[in-house]
Amino acid sequence: MRITEDRNLSHSSDTANGDKPVKAKKKTASESAASEALLAIILSSLEDDKAEDVVTIDLAGKSEMADQMIVCSGRSSRQVSAISEKLADRIKQETGYISKLEGKGPGDWVLVDAGDVIVHVFRPEVREFYQLEKMWQAGVPGSSDPTSLT
């Protein structure tokens, strides 16, 4: 299986023929299946590397940047870096896709861009400070109910 980087992003200001907004291309069944397979690879890797408090957030209909976002924690800067490096290696081995890593040096918060799935790996203190999950909660803005995550 090979995951492609083509996400067909569009913005409301983009127009075709100068008058109609360009709509994002709908995913085919095979693209959706590839996205689900990628999600399974990532979750398996995170479990193998002992990532803690793994939360999966469905971004479908909320953002065009990815289909899923995963937020998890490592116990230390060293574990955060190791989890993200091993994840990127596993994605490359199993799909051929080269993930982009940001923030690996300090090891407080590493973002792994795997195309259809974005993974944030935090040290617990940093995760608590930014509370990234709350930004993507469904329901009333400002709600702190963790059960409202989609």
Image (cartoon, rainbow, N blue to C red):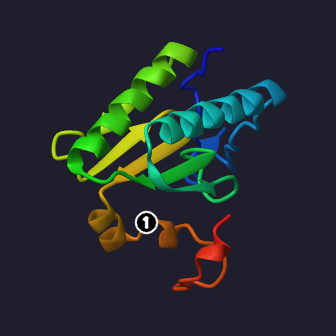
Near-viewer residue (103 or 83): 83
Tell me the quarter of the image containing the C terminus: bottom right
Which SS class for mark 1?
helix
> Percent position (x, y) of residue 35?
67, 33
Q: Nearer the viewer, residue 88 or 6?
A: 88
Q: Considering depth in this image, is 61 or 98 the residue closer to the camera?
A: 98
In the picture as drawn, the residue positioned furthest to the right comes out as 29
Image quadrant holding the N terminus, namely top right
**Taking 118 as reference, is 130 above or below it?**
below
- The answer to whether any part of residue 135 appears in the image is yes
Name the side, left or right, on which 23 lies relative to 117: right
| Whether residue 12 is situated above or below residue 132 in the rendered picture | above
Answer with the quarter of the image where residue 55 lies: bottom right
- Residue at image point 63% right, 45% down: 67
Identity of the residue drawn at 79% across and 24% down: 30
x, y percentage for residue 97?
A: 50, 19
Nearer the observer, 25 or 100:
100
| Residue 132 position in % (x across, y down) | 43, 66
Q: Amino acid at mark 1?
A: Leu
Tell me if I can see residue 116 in this picture: no
Numbered circles on residues, count:
1
Q: Which residue is mark 1?
A: 132
Is residue 117 left or right of 128 when viewed as pictured?
A: right
Q: Give coordinates of residue 41: x percent, y percent.
A: 59, 30
Question: On screen, 22 above or below 148?
Answer: above
Q: Vertical placement of 111 versus 5: above or below? A: below
Residue in view at x 70 percent, y 44 percent = 23
